[in-house]
Image (cartoon, grey):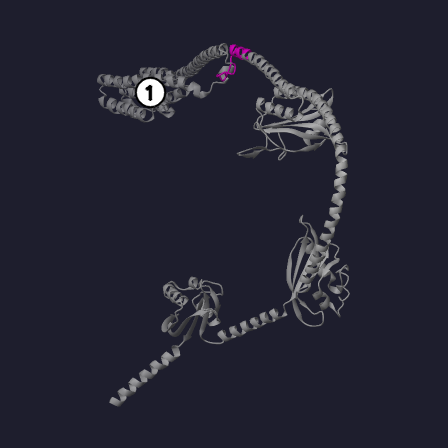
Amino acid sequence: MNEAVQISKEQLQPFIDKVHAEADNIVKYFITGYFFFGLVISVLYDTYLLALIMGSVTLGIYLVGRQLADGRYWFRIVISLLFWNFGLQFILQMRGMYEMYFFYFISLTVLLFYEDWRLLLPAMIYAIATFITIFYLQSSNSPWIASWDNLTDLTYTNLSLHVGIMIIYAILCIVWAKTQHNQTVRSALNHIHMDRQLVLMETNVNFANSISKGELRVEYSADQTDKLGQSLMNMRNSLVDASEREEQERFINTGLADVGEILRNNADDLGELCDQVMGKLINYMKANQGGIFILQEDEVTSEKYLELKACRAYERKKYLEKRIDIGQGLVGQAAIERRTIYMTEVPDHYINITSGLGKANPKSLLIVPLQSNEEVLGVLEMASFDTFDKTDREFLERVGESIAATVISTQTNERTKELLEQSNQMTEEMKAQEEEMRQNMEEMQATQEEMGRTQRELTDKEANLNALINNTGDSIITMDRNYKIVVMNDMVKERYKGTQYENMKEGSSVLDMLGDVRDEWKGYYDRAMHGEELNFIKKSSIHGEDTWREYFINPIKDKNGEVIGVSVFSRDITQRKKMENEMHERGFVMNAMINNTTDTYFAIDKDYKVLVANQVLKDRFMQSNTTLEVGMNILDVLPPEMYDKWKERYDRCLTGEKIILEEERPLNDRTIYTSLRCEPIMNDEGTILGVSVVSKDITPQREAMEQVEKLTTELQRSVSD
């Protein structure tokens, strides 16, 4: 039953299609037979025309439908109707002979081959409707029916009996169609089930053959299994488990033997021992990176810590130095808790596995404490892009025990060797102390002489430095981080005489005498203390005068880059400030000159960028809906038809040529005449910096001249007349 539930309609469809195809073939013969039967009885009853027309139409509908819709459900409905259409034809040909109703039973029986009770209903309804219609026409004395000489008189009782028989037979056919359909489905299910059993049998045979060949990892290829297949898989799983256990034991024992050999051969050198063991473990376990930390004791604080003794990545030795306190990080945690830590989600940046292609976080991390008799002597850490299985963890824990026992022995040997070397060294040191003391006395005398010479050099350097900072026109002050003045040159002292800052000197606080501006200047100094370099200009009136000074406030740093103070340099820039103001005023004058005229003035640099342009020119461009501003490229705002002409003029002037000409120019709806003057702009050395262009509107003059010429011509004509 479960097998049948799992079989889809798509799997059953081929069997149903086969039934329909066989039924279509049978129907074909019956439809053709009905047609020829109609021709035969047409000879007996002289109904050739009816047989040919009605039979041909019915047969034609069937043949056309078979070509266009063969296999469609609605076409089978049409076939059901066509079957009784022939029955109606026969009744008409034999003029009402009720015996032709036997074709109703034949038609329903043929339709049973489709095993679809729904196809019986159209023929049944059509036949009953035909029977009732003829009875009605007969009972109403229809003249069309009166000529039927084979029509038997029927009563309502006979009508009910005939219709009842037709319905009962239809019901029997419907039941039989359903029964046949169910039998077809069961047969299909049995066939599909048998095919599945054959497939499972073949799968089981192939699976058993693979197991007999030692291929224990082979997959069971069938989607579903039977009892035999399940038993074979259970047997395979048992064999796999046994093989894996044997392989795990071989892996652990072989690894322990190899590591034990390394421990025996390097018991006198802890560093080499750790390095060799680490290299073997990385290679044997196919890990990507690993390290051995050994428990050490600080000679000063007596605190214990873990020191990285060996590290390898991709079977290559890494020269790293690393110290981890007990309890710090995962390594320290494993040491203090005396338990193995295994992680498959390694925190970001905890450890990076580096290769020539880059670096990345490992997929798994295994940290095992090195223990011997409940005493932790170190930690073993392994990282890999693969996961460590239970066998790897068990192997590494047993290796940790072996390493711990060897570390105890190695440390004891190294300590004994170290004590012996210390004893020998102390003896040698005592012999050398007397010679060292004598040499120290000589060195002390030489040091005193060197200190005297150094003191003299420092005095000379200080004198030179004081001369340097005092022979400048700038004011110089340096202070420490407590705002105490360290250096103050003579220019500052001279400038502060007779002011509130007169008592300021080396050693005093630079903030104490600033008065109302204390917070402002303290802000400058604090910014420099934080490493900022300041440069600004301020108005100064210490003596009541109006002067301008430029200040440079910079941090003073030691050789390690730490800020230890601040230097303040300032100089009088009053004359420069006055020159700048004069230049600014001249700019206003120039703007007034070029803007208080009807002529156009502008200048461009060597890159065609506008340096200056008067308002007349800007307004003229604005009449063409174009904006002209300083800094714009003059070529970008020119109309396309004027681009080449004016660029050629600018280029000629940039080579040193002067251009003076008159030309007419369209402006909106009129023509103006201009006098144009283009000249190169040069500096004192004769270098061309740009081009100046002056354009004067001479339209009124030209119009006046034309008017004079016109009047002169008219006057001459009048004189001639």
Q: Residue 581 appears in which quarter of the rendering?
A: bottom right
Q: Is residue 189 left or right of residue 506?
A: left
Residue drawn at 77 percent across, 39 percent down: 437
Q: In this view, does 662 lie to the left or right of 604?
A: left
Does 487 lie within the magenta span? no
Along the viewing direction, whichever of 217 and 521 lies nearer the viewer: 521
Image coords of residue 242 (percent x, y): 58, 12
The residue at which mark 1 appears reads as 83
Residue type at the position of mark 1: Phe
Q: Residue 527 appears in which quarter of the rendering?
A: bottom right
**Residue 250 to residue 325: above or below:** above
Residue drawn at 39 percent across, 74 percent down: 674
Is any part of residue 115 visible from this angle? Answer: no
Q: What element carries label 1?
A: helix
Q: How many labels does the image show?
A: 1
- Local packing at callout 1 (Cα closer than 10 Å; few below 14, some 14-19, many 20+) is many
Q: Is residue 243 left or right of residue 567?
A: left
Is any part of residue 108 visible from this angle? Answer: yes
Along the viewing direction, whichever of 167 and 380 lies nearer the viewer: 380
Does 229 lie within the magenta span? yes
Along the viewing direction, whichever of 712 and 403 lies nearer the viewer: 403
Image coords of residue 715 (percent x, y): 29, 87
**Residue 547 to residue 398: above or below:** below
**Residue 15 to residue 675: above or below:** above
Image coords of residue 372 (percent x, y): 72, 20
Along the viewing direction, whichever of 494 and 9 lies nearer the viewer: 494
Q: Residue 717 appears in which quarter of the rendering?
A: bottom left
Residue drawn at 49 percent across, 68 percent down: 612
- Point out the stretch of residues depicted in magenta: 216-235
Which image quadrant: the C terminus? bottom left
Image coords of residue 690 (percent x, y): 45, 66
